[in-house]
Amino acid sequence: MAFFLALFVCGAAGDSDAAEPPKVDLQVGKAAYQRYCARCHGVLGAGDGVDAKRFYPRPRDLTLGIYKFRSTVSGTPPTDEDIYHILAEGLPGTNMPDWKHLSEETRWQLVYYLKSLSPAFNENPPQPVEVAADPGPKHADIKKGRALYEQLGCAACHGSSGRANGSSAAGLVDDWGLPIRSADLTQGWSYRGGANPRSVMLRFLTGIDGTGMPSYSGAISPEDAWHLAYYVETLQEKANWNLIAHPMAVEGPLPTTVEDPRWDSVRRTDIRLRHVVDNNGTWVSAPTVKALVLQSMYNKETIAFRLTWNDPTEDAVETVDSVALLLKTPQSQGDMLSLQTWPYDGSPVLDICLWSAKTKEAVEAVAAGFKAVGTAAVRSQRESQAEYKDGQWRLVIQRPIEPPASERASALSQKGLTAIGFAVWDGAYSSTRAVSPWVELDLRNNVKSDE
Ligand code: HEC
Ligand code: HEC
């Protein structure tokens, strides 16, 4: 009985998350807004809260009534359910949290209060876009979807493989005057409005207002829209997030090139990168490099790393793409060092292996900062090989597990875990870098291959 009842209630709730919205009480909504939202969205909703500048993208100016994630025709406001949905789920990959811990009643009052902040809701009624029945994954025509992706010009911004490296991707500015990047469609986890075909379809049918991402309702039939959405889903790569990496133990020589087929059998560890803010604590550009894939293999003496990361442009001449592998030194072992803040005045030295797209060389030294690597008294050259292809860098670097004492470089433990960190520079935005948390390398158990 309880089972049937539950089914019935879910069915009745339909797409919205709550059964019956409460009566409007703007005072309740306003109080909740001031308490939970004002620090980011501003006391009056203008997107200028005390914390606003620390975030990219910025908290929305809610007085303009421009909403990105809607089910409605471009230029019309979102439905109440659209806003309710955002409050329930938050916007993954941004600083907009979810508000699941607030009662449904409070969330609905917040929806009403947000609507009172902008005249857009009175000027124009929300107009839902036309959506066809879902053909389901078995009947979706992926080939047709791919053709539509090219025909409709998605690739111009998002790139043919979806890595945000289309010819029109650079130089986009949003309606709030800030630089914006088209989404990397291979990173399904970074879609803010949801990565399933239905959400993707709503994004391109409705457009993402304020961002330059156009609306395609009218340009594509509701049926074809599903084929395109299912195709976009095939671009998404499955990430294996982890803060422990298990390099694969092998006998004999290690791979020296990114193409070596042995890499295919090495488990990937996906690592989220965070961008370091400038000295004023504000963002200067839209982050481009958001994650890094680590793979590694080792034999008795040497370890080889293959690093893969998406970067929309190859920069190797004036401003330069580069990456650093970081190890702690005996002086910094056990320190609670965050790569977000390192290096700072008086910070401990780290072992830095710095690879640059300009020199195509990897140089390792113990230094108090990244720039100091080039002038360090003791420097070691590491074997490396790299390739840039279609919005993606791949790089192989080898280094000794226990470097000779003369190199003064850090050893990797074969009895316990060794912390390793990464910093990545996109040469197109060389004033900021993206850094990882510390990841533990485990050279103890000889994991043979991906299971
Ligand atoms: C820690 C900062 C922070 C707090 C607190 C916060 N937000 Fe946000 N919010 C953001 C950011 C950042 C964005 C923009 C994300 C983007 O552009 O993708 C955003 C976007 C939004 C949007 C726009 C969605 C769209 O479709 O464009 C709404 C609505 C919203 N927030 C409502 C709220 C409400 C209501 C609260 C309080 C219950 C709240 N936010 C609290 C940071 C915050
Ligand atoms: C003029 C450039 C441009 C074109 C053309 C374009 N997009 Fe976008 N797209 C963007 C931008 C910019 C964003 C990021 C918006 C943001 O960060 O808020 C985006 C974001 C997205 C997202 C992610 C939304 C999310 O939930 O975070 C999807 C999915 C998407 N686009 C699909 C498409 C498809 C499919 C097409 C073709 C039918 C297309 N786009 C055409 C610029 C474009």
Image: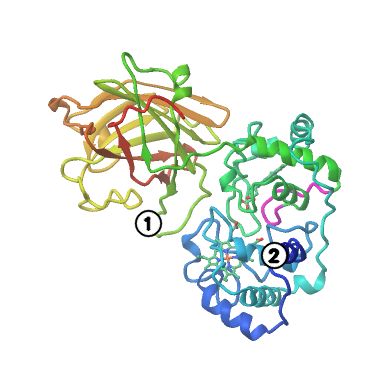
Q: Quadrant of residue 147?
A: top right
Residue beneath disc 1? 279
Residue beneath disc 2? 6
Instruction: Classify 10 Å Cα crowding around label 1: few (below 14), some (14-19), many (20 and above).
Output: few
Q: Splitting the image into four quadrants, where does ligand 1 fall?
A: bottom right
Q: Secondary structure at mark 1?
A: loop
Q: Nearer the viewer, mark 2 or mark 1?
A: 2
Q: Is residue 254 left or right of residue 270?
A: left
User: Is ligand 1 within 8 Å of the beta carbon of the residue shown at mark 1?
Assistant: no
Residue 233 numbered mark, or none: none
Residue 84, given in percent of the width and then of the height, sits at: 67, 67
Q: Which residues are magenta?
A: 208-217
Above or below for 234 versus 349:
above
The amino acid on which the numbered mark 2 sits, given as a three-letter code, is: Ala
Is 351 one of the magenta-colored residues? no
Residue 381, given in percent of the width and then of the height, sits at: 27, 23
**Count of number-bearing discs:** 2
Mark 2 to mark 1: distance in Å? 53 Å
- Outermost residue toward the top in this view: 252
Is 214 one of the magenta-colored residues? yes
> What quarter of the picture does the N terminus occupy?
bottom right
Residue 177, given in percent of the width and then of the height, sits at: 61, 57
User: In terms of secondary structure, what is the magenta stretch mainly?
Assistant: loop
- Residue 120 versus residue 303: which sits nearer the camera? 303
- Outermost residue toward the front in this view: 1
Q: Secondary structure at mark 2?
A: helix
The amino acid on which the numbered mark 1 sits, given as a three-letter code, is: Asn
